[in-house]
Image (cartoon, grey):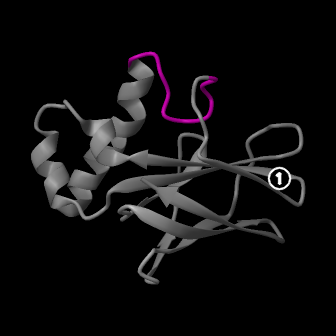
Amino acid sequence: MKKIILSAIMILIFTLPAAAGESCCPSSAKTKMDQTSEINGFQLEYKFIDMKEKMKGMKDMDHQMDQMTATHHLMLFIKNAKGEAVAADMVGFLITGPDGKDQKVMTMGMSGGYGADVKLSEGKYTVKAKAVIGDQKLIDTFTYTLK
């Protein structure tokens, strides 16, 4: 049941904004990225999406959101030196929370990037991302404060 609910939410997150003329993802010039990094000539762009905020006002979604443990969706977009999207073989995150506990998640390819659901509350997080592109391993670490 949780997989069905999660699938429905992910479809809504990534299709309704496009239908409304705005995007959830960095293809829109209006979108502010939460974090960018450059590793070995690749541009990494991260976006934290607050799932409850994104779903606010959508009929019948409040009850389903209450059943989910994830609070945010973390996206990573990888581009080469020319600014073109790059396909990765694998992308994963290791997120250490303010309490010192780790969340280890693997991503799915979606909307030109790679995303995973995570559980965050207020505080400072250390995010470590690993992307494998052919024989290259891109490893990036940054801190993110959720207010």
**Image coordinates for residue 13, horizontal then vertical, percent:** 37, 38
Residue at (35%, 27%) from the top-left corner? 16
Amino acid under disc 1: Phe
Q: Which residue is mark 1?
A: 42
Residue at (23%, 35%) from the top-left corner? 56
Quadrant of the frame with the N terminus:
bottom left
Q: Is residue 22 left or right of residue 66?
A: right
Residue 129 to residue 112: above or below = below
Q: Which residues are magenta?
A: 20-29
Does the magenta segment cover residue 106?
A: no
Residue lying furthest top in this view?
21
Does the magenta segment cover residue 23?
A: yes
Element at badge 1? strand
Q: Nearer the viewer, residue 37 or 78?
A: 37
Residue at (59%, 46%) from the top-left corner? 34
**Image coordinates for residue 52, horizontal then vertical, percent:** 27, 45
Q: Nearer the viewer, residue 14 or 139?
A: 139
**Image coordinates for residue 79, horizontal then vertical, percent:** 77, 45
**Image coordinates for residue 103, horizontal then vertical, percent:** 45, 76
Q: Is residue 59 left or right of residue 102?
A: left
Q: Nearer the viewer, residue 131 or 69?
A: 69
Q: Looking at the magenta stretch, what is its main secondary structure?
A: loop
Q: Count the marks.
A: 1
**Crowd around label 1: few <14 · some 14–19 · many ≥20 (10 Å):** some
Residue at (55%, 36%) from the top-left corner? 25
Residue 95 to residue 116: above or below = below
Q: Quadrant of residue 3 in the image?
A: bottom left
